[in-house]
Image (spheres, rainbow, N blue to C red):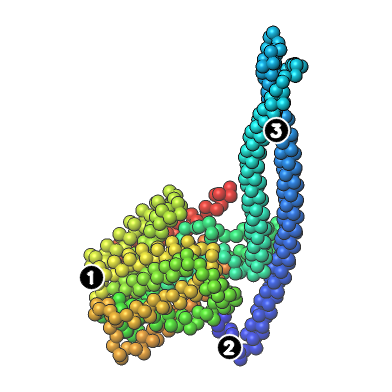
Amino acid sequence: MAQRNVYSSKDEPEDTQSAEEVLHSVMQELDALHQNVKGQLNQDITRLQTEKNHLIEDIEDLREQYRKLQSQQMESLSGRYIQQQQLWLKQLAQVLAHNLQDLLVQRFNELSANSGNSLSSPIPSGEFPIPLPPSNYDERASQLLAALDERIDRSFQMLEQDLTSYESELSVRLNNMKTLELQGEELLQNLVNRIREELESEEEYLENPFDAQDSYVEESTNSLNSVRPQFLQPTPAATPREPAPQPSSAPAATVKASSQVQTGLVLALSSAVVLSLFNVCLRILIKSKNPRMVFGLFEFPGVVTPGFGNSLLILLMRLIVVMALMPILATFLYPSVWKDIRRLFESGDRALWSKVLGSAFFLFLSQVLIYLAIGNIPAGIAITIFFIYPIVTVLGSWILFGSRPSKVGFFAIVGITAGLILAGWPSFAAPAPGGGNVGVGVAAALASGITFAGYVLLTQMAAGKLHPIPFSLVNFGAIFVFSSLSLWVPLSDNFAPKIDPNVWPGLIVGGVVLGVLTLFSYLLNNFAIRFAGAALASVIGTLGPAMTALFGFLIINEKLQPVAILGMAVVTLSVAAMSVERIMAPQKKAS
């Protein structure tokens, strides 16, 4: 308020001069920050270019070694094949010579026996006698040559069969080698493409570090939920990038970093305050049995009665404002938002689309149900019961991703369960203020937390494939379509909207207020994550139930019983313990 008065009082020259000095000092600090970040980014880009050149040289060396090994293997195979052929021919010649020798000895013995001039003893193998020429020598020589030709033909046929089998085996081996060669080339190509993509993404990150996907799941979740759920389990795809190494002797940079964290925490607290105001405004917008006293100054009877159809209508009115302003805000926060959305439509990735639309549908159901819950029970109690979703998220992550919770996680689950019982029990023991239906309100809050856990799990599955801001814009658009279709489809009397024509101006104003608060919280939370990180912002987000109850008491005098306040505190501390464990887990692994 002090700064606002300084800037508004332009008549006093001293105040104008001080404002100019403050503006001049802020401009100097921004210039210094710009020069510092620019120098560091130039150093990182130079280092990455050097590493890229080294990687390219290593890949060329690997290819050269692969060619040498391939040539050596081919030479070894060819030399081995020639040696094997020589060995086969030598063995064949020995077999032919032995068979020919046995056949000649046998024939000469027969000729000698037929001519009556046989030797007194049989001719031993390996010796060639010189028999006397018989009378039928020509006939015996022809028979001998025919038998020799038959034996040689049979031997050559056997050799041909062996050569054919060896040739087929060698051909199979060569085909296998060719297949392995193609696979090796494909692997090298994939490796080169992967390295090139990582280098390009690293360069893009250095060129615009605020657009990095450091906290994909947390940012997209926080931006879409008007109730400020912050607890999420980390996934491998959403692991934060390691910061670039900074010089050790940089006290000024350390001071600036600490100041940025403080700024981020203030922004996260401001976002939690805006979301709490959103919940209280929603409570004021819904009619009660007795008119609510706003700030103790005037009574406000409300605009619509609590119900499923009216919750759909409030959500649609809010989304009309969001969809009118969100594209401008998204372009301001992330200039490449439309390129990413066009790439998503052109990709044809059905798995990614199913996760995006499924998460939007679960968030749509969660929003409608939490509106119904806030209309029937106090906003602080509804938000506290809504925080059952960390339990469902932890169990779902354990089943789907194998992320078993730690001891702190189990104790937090027990604490959240006990806190929910303590917070919800007074609502059943006494009638709800304003004449709402306690059973419907508690059941709607529980169902809202469970459906929101489904949204969180599907968002985790899609983490890393799409930037948080395009993801948020697509989710808002899908929820707008679901809301419009739900109101367009004929509903029964219990679920259809019931609006008095005279309250349309108030409903339109309420939708504008809710939409503006949603976008304002989204903007504050986005910058809080950029300055302080998603982990610290999530710790501040656990104050949502307590702050909602506090603003409900201050604005509309909505009192809670001590047991409900105790349960709310237990739930807040349990969820905060989970968030703190997420911050400490990377440090424990590093140590």
Q: Which three-letter amino acid code belongs to the residue tagged 2?
A: Ser
Which residue bears the numbered disc 1? Answer: 431
Determine the image quadrant of residue 23.
bottom right
Rendered view: 197 above or below 180: below
Tag 1: residue type?
Pro
Residue 494 location (% of width, % of height) = 24, 77
Residue 406 seen in render: yes
Q: Is residue 278 visible?
A: no
Alpha carbon distance from label 1 to label 2: 51 Å
In the picture, the disc for residue 6 is: none
Is 361 situated left or right of 26 in this image? left
Secondary structure beneath dot 1 equals loop
Residue 45, quarter of picture: bottom right
- Observer-side mark, 2 or 3, equals 3
302 w.r.t. 374: above or below? below
Q: Quadrant of residue 449?
A: bottom left
Q: In the image shown, does 258 or 200 lie closer to the viewer?
A: 200
Q: Which residue is mark 3?
A: 88
Q: Decide: marks 1, 2 in contact (CB < 8 A)?
A: no
Residue, x 69% and y 72% (percent of image)?
34
